[in-house]
């Protein structure tokens, strides 16, 4: 009996490792191939020149101005999109939960809508809107923030809504109000600290999305890092592949940090419980 | 404020003709309620009777459609929740999960811009007052339900509220903790002297705790009075049935009395039925059962409740009667025993049959 259980446990462990290994190969192989390609020197030698070039921003901006512009634009787009998404979404979702619970389904539907519309269709709709955006705020690439905020809505909404479901927002808000807190204090001191990891995951998902977006930027003739990679891919392949790899790794690291941040919080809670 | 035992003189609270409607439901229908300074009033009633709505309107969490709310003589209808200065304890656990017990208690003091040292001292004092000082640095999820409600009470009292509002604070707790905490709420309330409104659907809780109990029905006060008044002299059939256990007997009203089981009982509410058939509501402690082989009743069930027990008897017309007897007599009254049922001649409430 014990032997059977042990045998089954071993079989499951083996199966687990097989799955992990196969998946790792599937995911890592392209990355390794990218790395290999970007470090391939003349005559098949190993060289890190491309990577040195990539992280020497001074030289990079002179050699590949397109790439430099795209990277700068993407950097600001990330910051602005995260800020706009959170500033719009967090108070809205909290408010709907507290005061307009009947609108919840509608807000959820609206927020999930962008997921169901192909990017290409979205662009067809966005083009005339952007004619007005250009008219009012100019044609800078940073105006993509608006489009990216819409794209990020489904992911950010899900993350924040899940976070809010874990706490009794209504009672907590009423308790804080009865103790003398205004709405701003309720938001800042009571709601936000309790959905911190949800807000963090909404932010990270938005970052990952903005770093990887190509279609809309390209079709609206704006610059971002993906558009630059695409342009450079024709002239200097190695540097564009290096940037792709760096962007991918950055997104992975962020997502890792995200699960790590959530996990650490839970673990520290448990430690306190046993103390 | 150096000690927590200093008695603050509570303020008077007055609800005048307050009404509130939610869609088709008339939650409050011209409610009038007067609370003296330092008094603990319990609002008692079945769910949907408007008791919680009354408390939430007083707190400012709901708006009244009409009527006036006076605290210390001032109309506070236009004062928002966060400026009403009312401490509140909720039915659901409402401690802020990211703060420790002592930080939770400090929350309201911090908003009142007290210095860190002063608020920490006050918070610790309040936690000691509710008997949970040793758990000051625990997070809510490390505390039991009863402990969480103690902290919530400390948090509500820390701000020295004008009025303390307790919205079924005990109903999520198990029976033993409930009774313990109930007694302590009373002790603390007497100590700090804050005018308190307590909402509950548990009649035992209301009777044990309150200076006065208001029984609510369909958005109005059916009766308000001391726990003893409510229990001994219920004004209506609804109060008699909702508070305490009552037997319903078919009887006949005549000349200011009611004939039930060949006994003539005086009327508590002579106006309700002037004459003719009526239902008389009789408390179990007014029913006597005696083992008698010639008796018309038969014991069908016995429940042991400590020094006193309840015996359920069925009569020939299938009426079930619950009687309260001393547990010492249970040996004579096993199920199946033939018994004679008599009623003590105490005043009873009647309602139209």
Image: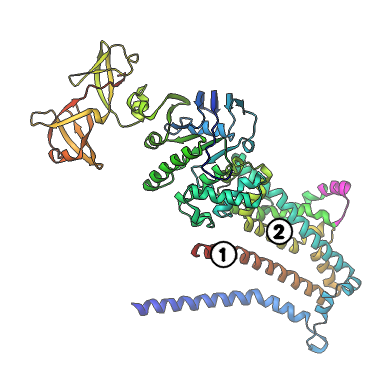
B251 sits left or right of B103 in the view: left
In percent of width and height, residue B31 lies at 51, 24
Which residues are the magenta region? A129-140
Q: Residues within 10 Å of mark 1 (few under 14, many from 20)?
A: few
Task: Determine which quarter of the picture holds residue A246.
Answer: bottom right
Residue identified by numbered label 1: A268
Secondary structure mostly seen in magenta is helix
Q: Is residue B248 left or right of residue A173?
A: left
In the image, are marks 1 and 2 on the same chain? yes
**Which residue is rendered at x = 80% and y = 82% of the image?**
A48
- Residue at the far left: name it: B293
Residue B327: percent from left, percent from top: 20, 40
Q: Position of residue A158 (x, y in %)?
A: 62, 53
**Picture coordinates of residue A156, whole percent (x, y):** 67, 54
Marked residue chain, label 2: A
Q: Which quadrant holds the N terminus of chain A?
A: bottom left
Q: Are marks 1 and 2 in contact (CB under 8 Å)?
A: no
> Foreground: A59 or A118?
A59
SS for callout 2: helix
| Residue A228 among those drawn in magenta | no
Q: Secondary structure at mark 1?
A: helix
Residue at the image position 49 percent from the left and 38 percent from the top: B166
N-terminal of the pair, mark 1 or mark 2, is: 2
Please tell me the numbered disc located at residue B97: none
The residue that mark 2 highlights is: A206
- Taking the spot 78% from the left edge, 56% from the top edge, the residue there is A80
Q: Is residue A132 magenta?
A: yes
């Amino acid at each position: 009996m014990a032997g059977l259980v042990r045998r089954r446990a071993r079989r499951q462990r083996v199966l687990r490792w097989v799955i992990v290994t196969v998946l790792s190969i599937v995911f890592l192989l392209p990355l390794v191939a990218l790395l290999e390609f970007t470090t391939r020197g003349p005559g098949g030698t190993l060289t890190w020149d491309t990577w040195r070039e990539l992280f020497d921003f001074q030289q990079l901006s002179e050699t590949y101005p397109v790439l430099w512009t795209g990277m700068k634009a993407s950097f600001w787009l990330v910051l602005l999109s995260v800020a706009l998404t959170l500033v719009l979404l967090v108070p809205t979702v909290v408010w709907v939960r507290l005061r307009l619970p009947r609108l919840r389904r509608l807000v959820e539907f609206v927020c999930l809508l962008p997921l169901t519309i192909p990017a290409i269709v979205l662009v067809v709709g966005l083009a005339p809107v952007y004619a007005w955006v250009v008219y009012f705020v100019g044609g800078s690439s940073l105006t993509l923030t608006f489009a990216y905020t819409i794209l990020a809505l489904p992911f950010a909404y899900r993350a924040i809504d899940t976070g809010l479901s874990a706490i009794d927002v209504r009672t907590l808000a009423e308790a804080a109000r009865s103790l003398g807190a205004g709405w701003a204090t309720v938001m800042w001191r009571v709601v936000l600290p309790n959905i911190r990891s949800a807000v963090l995951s909404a932010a990270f998902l938005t970052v990952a999305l903005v770093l990887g977006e190509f279609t809309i930027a390209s079709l609206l003739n704006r610059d971002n890092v993906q558009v630059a990679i695409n342009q450079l891919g024709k002239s200097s392949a190695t540097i564009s592949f290096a940037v792709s790899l760096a962007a991918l790794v950055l997104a992975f690291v962020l997502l890792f940090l995200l699960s790590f941040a959530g996990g650490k919080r839970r673990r520290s809670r448990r430690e306190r419980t046993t103390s | 404020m150096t000690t927590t035992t200093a008695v603050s003189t509570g303020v008077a609270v007055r609800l005048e003709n307050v009404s509130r409607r939610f869609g088709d439901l008339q939650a409050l229908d011209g409610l009038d309620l007067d609370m003296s300074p330092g008094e603990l009033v319990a609002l008692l009633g079945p769910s949907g009777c408007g008791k919680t709505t009354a408390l939430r309107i007083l707190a400012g969490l709901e708006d009244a459609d009409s009527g006036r709310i006076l605290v210390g003589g001032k109309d506070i209808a236009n004062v928002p929740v966060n400026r009403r200065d009312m401490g509140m304890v909720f039915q659901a656990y409402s401690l802020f999960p990211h703060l420790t017990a002592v930080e939770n208690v400090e929350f309201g003091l911090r908003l009142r811009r007290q210095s860190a040292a002063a608020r920490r001292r006050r918070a610790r004092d309040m936690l000691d007052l509710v008997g949970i000082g040793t758990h000051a640095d625990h997070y809510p999820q490390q505390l039991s339900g009863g402990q969480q409600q103690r902290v919530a009470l400390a948090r509500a009292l820390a701000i020295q509220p004008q009025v303390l509002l307790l919205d079924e604070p005990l109903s999520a707790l198990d029976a033993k903790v409930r009774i313990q905490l109930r007694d302590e709420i009373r002790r603390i309330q007497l100590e700090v002297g804050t005018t308190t409104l307590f909402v509950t659907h548990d009649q035992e809780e209301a009777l044990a705790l309150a200076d006065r109990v208001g029984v609510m029905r369909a958005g109005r006060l059916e009766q308000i009075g001391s726990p003893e008044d409510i229990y001994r002299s219920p004004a209506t059939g609804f109060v008699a049935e909702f508070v305490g256990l009552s037997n319903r007997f078919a009887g006949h009203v005549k000349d200011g009395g009611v004939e039930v089981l060949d006994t003539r009982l005086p009327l508590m509410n002579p106006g309700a039925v002037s004459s003719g058939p009526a239902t008389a509501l009789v408390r179990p402690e007014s029913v006597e059962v005696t083992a008698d082989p010639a008796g018309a009743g038969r014991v069908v069930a016995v429940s042991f409740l400590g020094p006193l027990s309840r015996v359920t008897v069925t009569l020939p017309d299938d009426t079930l009667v619950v009687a309260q007897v001393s547990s010492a007599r249970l040996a004579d009254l096993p199920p199946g025993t033939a018994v004679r049922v008599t009623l003590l001649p105490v005043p009873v409430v009647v309602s139209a049959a």
